C-alpha cells in the first residue's frame, strides 16, 4: 500500500489549535485514518466500501451518535 499524498482534517476538529481530531486520506481502494496529535504513529486503513458504510451509519437518524 502506498503512503497517502494528502491528509484531510475534519471541520469538527475541536477548539484552539484544532488538533483534537482524526485525519483521513484517500488511497483509492482504502481509506487511511490517523490521529492528528500523533501523526507519525500508526495509521488504520479500511476498504473504501466499509468506510463509506461506516459514515452512512453515523449519519443515520437511528445512530446512537446522531443528536436528538
Image (tube, grey):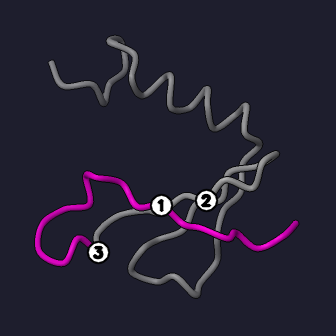
Give the distance between the C-alpha atoms of the residues marked 1 and 3, in whole angstroms.
Answer: 12 Å
Of callouts 1 and 2, the N-terminal one? 1
- The residue singled out by tag 3 in the image is 19
Residue at 23% across, 70% down: 18
Callout 3: helix, strand or loop? loop
The image quadrant that residue 10 belongs to is bottom left
Residue under circle 1? 8
Magenta segment includes 28: no
Could you say where residue 51 lies in the image, as x and y percent from the top left? 63, 38
Q: Is residue 65 left or right of residue 43?
A: left
Q: Is residue 6 above or below residue 55?
A: below
Q: Are marks 1 and 3 in contact (CB under 8 Å)?
A: no
Observer-nearest residue: 38 or 12?
A: 12
Q: Most extreme residue toward the top, as rendered?
A: 62
- Residue 1 occupies quadrant: bottom right
Q: Which residues are magenta?
A: 1-18
Dot 3 surroundings within 10 Å: few (below 14), some, or many (20 or more)? some
* Quadrant of the drawing holding the C terminus: top left
In the rendered view, tell whether residue 61 sits above or below residue 51. Answer: above
The secondary element bearing badge 1 is classed as strand
Prevalent SS, magenta region: loop
Residue position marked by numbered label 2 in the rendering: 25
Do the residues bearing badges 1 and 2 touch, measured as CB atoms within 8 Å? yes
Amino acid at each position: 500500500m502506498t503512503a497517502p499524498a494528502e491528509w484531510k482534517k475534519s471541520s469538527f476538529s475541536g477548539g484552539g489549535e484544532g488538533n483534537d481530531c482524526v485525519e483521513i486520506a484517500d488511497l483509492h481502494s482504502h481509506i487511511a485514518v490517523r490521529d492528528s496529535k500523533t501523526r507519525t504513529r500508526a495509521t488504520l486503513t479500511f476498504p473504501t466500501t466499509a468506510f463509506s458504510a461506516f459514515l452512512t451509519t453515523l449519519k443515520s437518524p437511528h445512530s446512537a451518535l446522531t443528536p436528538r
